[in-house]
Each structure stands twice: as C-alpha cells, then as structure tokens.
Amino acid sequence: MVFPRLILASQSPRRRELFGWLGFPFETLDGSIDESPIPGEDAGYHVLRIAEAKAEAAAQGLDGDFIVVSADTVVVDRGEILGKPVDATHAEQILQRLSGHDHFVDTGFIFYNLSDRSMAKGLCESRVRMRSFSDQEIKTYVLSGDPLDKAGAYAIQNREFNPVPEFSGCMANVMGLPLCHLKRELIRQGIVLNADLVMTCKDQLGYDCRISTKILNGEDIG
C-alpha cells in the first residue's frame, strides 16, 4: 500500500522529536508565520487559525500526495493568551503569575491533505495546576535558560523545577503536540502506525497516561 508523504510544518526540535514518536516517516518544512494574536481573540480560535496558516505556508510549492501536519500551542491564564517570554524578567513575571493555580494549554492542529485540498482540524485543551514557587526557585529556573523559549515560561517535563507535581491529562499536549489526537486522525486518513505510542510516551516521559485509550477511542479530552 502506498501512503501519502507526511510533512510536519515546524522547525521546532521538540515538536519534531514528539512527532517522530508516532513511528511513521516524515519530512519537515518551515511553516513560520506571524503568530500574533488578534486583540480579544479566543484561544481555541487562535491556535486553529495559526495552525492553518502554518500548514498553508509550508504547502506552498507542494503538489501531489502529501499530508501537511501543523500545530500551534498556547498557555491561557484567566482568558489571556500567554506567549513566550521576551526576556528573563518577563519569564519571572509569567511564572509568578501562574504560581499556585490552574491554567490551560490549548493546541490546535491541522491535517492538510493536498491530494484533495481538504483540511481536518482538531483542538486539545489540558488543565494544568502549577505548584507554588518561591521567588528564589523562579530566579534559579530562569537562570537555567529553560523557560526562555517556551510558551508560559515553563517545561512540564523539567524534573528539577517540577512545575506540575500532579497531572492527569495529555503531557505531550502541554509539550506542544497531542500525540494520541494526532494518531487518531492519521488512522482516519488511512495511515497505519505500527509504533506503540502509549508505551513510547511512558518510556520517554516517565509518565503513565490515564486518558490515551479514551482519546484513541474518540473522546475529546486533553
């Protein structure tokens, strides 16, 4: 059986790594665009709009049996989209803001099938409860450089900082790519994936996901 060629519209090393866990060969193309939110824009609408624009940007000049996959992830606190920090001071401010309460991580993803110019869209939202941080913990973490290129100024998988001690959602989504949601859509697109994604996530992240089976069975949870 001949499958479409998969293109990941991303230059993010983390997203490329995560996508590789699906166990299907793919290529990458640059889908860089202006990701600025429109004032008052709903977070779910925003990530889908940006993901669609990334897919279209990466698809420029392509013709044939390709599926372009793109995604956009934002941190949402009390209705406000939080992007990546502009500098260390901004990172500290974001972490102080998120400390000790819940926020959401939204990822919109697009499957752009160039053979018939159809688009399948999906949205994953995860509720995340941060632990409370001391000012010194925040300063030490920011000095490590880890939060400076991440939406919300943190990496959920950082075991030393350990920003989220208890979590029951899709950790891959918080990292930028909800893999079980993507696997479900790839199967719908007729692509056979042989990798044991649940075990791969567990091995790579040390995280025993409680919702993967529900997602693969069609539930819209994150």
Image: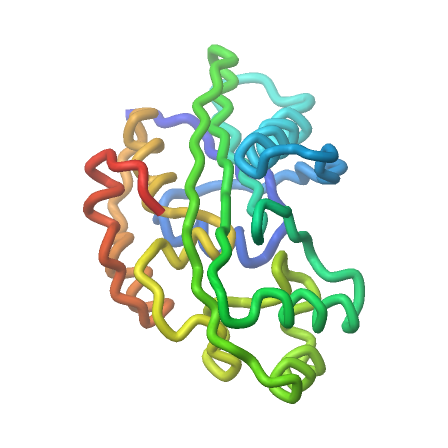
Question: Does 26 appear above or below 5?
Answer: below
Q: Is residue 133 left or right of residue 159?
A: right
Closer to the camera in the image, 136 or 18: 136
Taking the spot 28% from the left edge, 31% from the top edge, the residue there is: 187
Q: Quadrant of the N terminus?
A: top left
Residue 29 % position (x, y):
63, 39
Along the line of sight, which residue is nearer the eye, 32 or 27?
Answer: 32
Colour scheme in the image?
Answer: rainbow
Toward the bottom, the furthest residue is: 136
- Residue 32 percent location from the top left of the image: 71, 39
**219 horizontally vs 150: left or right:** left
Which residue does the image show at 53% across and 52% down from the upper left?
15
- Given residues 82 and 210, the one toward you in this image is 82
Q: Position of residue 99 (x, y in %)?
A: 56, 71
Residue at the spot 32% in from the left edge and 72% down from the top edge: 206
Up the image or down, 135 lies above or below 89; here it is below
Q: Taking 114 as reference, is 163 above or below it?
A: below
Give the quadrant of residue 55: top right
- What percent of the width, then of the height, locates residue 111? 47, 28
Q: How many tags in the picture?
A: 0
Q: Of all residues shown, which one is farthest toward the top?
A: 116
Q: Identify the residue at horizontal 65%, vertical 84% (top origin).
A: 135
The foreground one among 18 and 44 is 44
